[in-house]
């Protein structure tokens, strides 16, 4: 728009309007795809992400327990109690 109005780059043509409408059309297609058709943040997505986080947490916990068991920290603490 600046090129067209201020610098007078082809002032007889409002070519920037075509760019705005093309961008708007692509934005509407994207909005439709994300929020209406595929439901990006739907219940299935939430369930899958929660399962992934629980699995990662379990793996990290297993590694930490193995490391503590290897160093003897867990054996010493359980015998003190």
Image: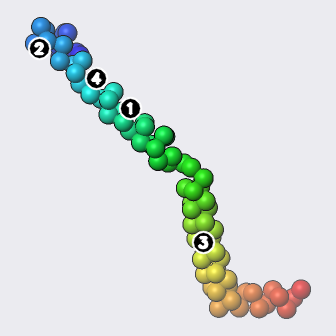
Q: In the figure, 20 relative to 43: above or below?
A: above
- Tell which tag, 1 or 3, sits nearer the viewer: 1
Dot 4 and dot 3 residues touching (CB under 8 Å): no
Give the residue drawn at x 85%, y 91%.
79
Dot 3 and dot 2 residues touching (CB under 8 Å): no
Quarter residue 56 falls in: bottom right
- Tell which tag, 3 or 2, sits nearer the viewer: 3
- Residue denoted by label 1: 28
User: Can you see residue 8?
Assistant: no
Dot 1 and dot 4 residues touching (CB under 8 Å): no
The one nearer the camera, 37 or 6, is 37
Q: In the figure, 5 relative to 47: above or below?
A: above
Circle 4 crowding by C-alpha within 10 Å: few under 14, some 14–19, many from 20: few
Q: In the figure, 33 relative to 24: above or below?
A: below
- Residue denoted by label 4: 20
Q: Secondary structure at mark 4?
A: helix
Q: Is residue 21 left or right of residue 7?
A: right
Which of the two discs, 4 and 2, labels the residue nearer the N terminus?
2
- Residue denoted by label 2: 9
**Residue 36 position in % (x across, y down):** 48, 40
As measured in the structure, the alpha-carbon distance from the residue carrying label 1 to the one carrying label 4 is: 12 Å
Q: Secondary structure at mark 1?
A: helix
Question: What colouring method underlies this structural image?
Answer: rainbow
User: Can you see residue 65?
Assistant: yes
- Tell which tag, 4 or 2, sits nearer the viewer: 4
Circle 3 crowding by C-alpha within 10 Å: few under 14, some 14–19, many from 20: few
Dot 2 and dot 1 residues touching (CB under 8 Å): no
- Tell which tag, 4 or 3, sits nearer the viewer: 4
Which of the two discs, 1 and 4, labels the residue nearer the N terminus?
4
Dot 1 and dot 3 residues touching (CB under 8 Å): no
- Residue denoted by label 3: 55
């Amino acid at each position: 728009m600046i090129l067209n109005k201020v610098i007078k780059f082809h002032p007889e043509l409002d070519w920037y309007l075509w760019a705005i409408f093309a961008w708007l059309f692509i934005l509407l297609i994207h909005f439709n795809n994300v929020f209406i058709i595929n439901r990006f943040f739907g219940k299935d997505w939430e369930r899958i992400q929660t399962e992934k986080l629980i699995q990662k947490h379990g793996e990290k916990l297993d590694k930490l327990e193995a490391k503590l068991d290897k160093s003897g920290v867990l054996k010493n603490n359980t015998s003190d109690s």
